[in-house]
Image (cartoon, grey):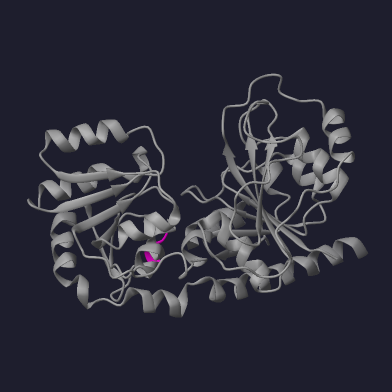
Amino acid sequence: MNRRIVAVSDFCDFAPPCPSELDYSDFHAAWSRMALPASGAPGPGPVVGGYLERLPLAAVAAGLADTAEVWSFAGRDDSPRDSAGLVSAAPAGLTRRVFRADGHAAPYGSADALAHIAVHGAPDILCVWGLGVNEALLDACQDSVIIYNSIDAPAIRIPPAISRHVDIFLTGADWQSAEILARHPGALCSVLPIGPEFASDITFHPTGAAKDYDVVYVAATQPYKRHDLLLDALAGRPGTRALCVVGYGHLTGALQDQARARGLDIDWVGPVSHDEVNALINRARVGVVCGVDDGAPAILTEYMLAGLPVLANAGLVCGRQYIRPDTGLTAAEPDFAAALDRLIARHATYDTRAVVQSKWTWPHSVGRLSDLIDAALVRHARKVSA
């Protein structure tokens, strides 16, 4: 039997238009006419990519599942997808599927995904990230082990009607676990954020590149990422050369204008692939995380695997546990420029890659995840026998 693990991203390429619900029968008929599109080849592949890919691939590598998939949504019928869900480029051993979203905001519903599940079955393990999916999709996966991680700083970004279906909550800090347990007493809950804990030392590694930047910040240009703190620190340390790698966000142009107006030496790059991110961060001496109201960012341990010490905002609400004397510094905002100066001067004394490999790469974390899944399966069995 093919055991499947699916991670559902809350990404939708366009805001879904009306009508709010699409015709399930049409999707069901389409799925019934065809075999299940090819899934990732059974058996482990390399655990590579970003946070969406690494946990499912780690689960296959650890024997928790045979195949791994990542699902996301399309908001329009003319989005680049086929009638059976897009099977697009993905790391070896992983399949991506894109389903037509119903016409409402996240948490998403999808008559297309419901039809797929009805015809081809629910995954054995369903990982719901961020804003996730609606209750109808979770009802269709009631026999699956359902795992939730909010990704961003709010402890839980889905309403109680949806979160009550979750078997395992992965959090980024103890305060998040406490908030979840206040809503769902007795829930299986662990501080195991998918980004930094399922780090891939294949994807992120030293390249030996020349260090032609002092500091790098890999972050979306959105307000919560606090690029203003980096700009202020650079203004307080004249002559610092910085690189900003941008995935998405609406503030890129405004931030570039501010940097130019202040005479700051910043290059802006992106979006780029994970391999290119690794190549770029290797050109810097120090990586920074400037946000406060942020989840435990994956880039924390990605910087470290590339050999960089990290300077993080002391106010960061999730992920400060990864900043230790042997991995970097935290600093309050008024002290950020001075801390950056110290860390740049000492960057070559750190062996951050070895620290991450000993504690936070995916083989360590998937063992903890396996124990949680076993506990969830015991609870499922009790419900069946009750």
Image quarter for residue 74?
top right
* Front residue of this view, candidates 129 and 84: 84
Q: Residue at x 77, y 55 (%)?
A: 123
- Looking at the picture, how far across and down is residue 225, in whole percent? 35, 45
**Residue 296 visible to an observer of this rendering:** no
* Front residue of this view, candidates 189 and 147: 147
Q: Residue at x 30, y 52 (%)?
A: 217
Q: Outermost residue, right direction?
A: 385
Q: Residue at x 79, y 50 (%)?
A: 141
- Looking at the picture, how far across and down is residue 175, in whole percent? 48, 58
Q: Quadrant of the C terminus?
A: bottom right
**Residue 367 visible to an observer of this rendering:** yes
Horizontal side of 267 relative to 366 (left or right) equals: left
Magenta: main secondary structure equals: loop
Q: Residue at x 35, y 40 (%)?
A: 221
Q: Outermost residue, left direction?
A: 238
Image quarter for residue 216?
bottom left
Image quarter for residue 321?
bottom left
Q: Quadrant of the N terminus?
A: bottom right
Horizontal side of 88 relative to 244 (left or right) equals: right
Query: Relative to residue 191, is residue 218 depicted above or below?
Result: above
Query: Relative to residue 294, is residue 329 depicted above or below?
Result: below
Query: Relative to residue 162, is residue 295 depicted above or below?
Result: below
Report if residue 115 lies within the magenta region. no
- Looking at the picture, how far across and down is residue 301, in whole percent? 40, 65
Query: So how many labels did they put on this image?
Result: 0
- Looking at the picture, how far across and down is residue 302, in whole percent? 40, 63
Q: Which residues are magenta?
A: 317-321
Horizontal side of 160 relative to 266 (left or right) equals: right
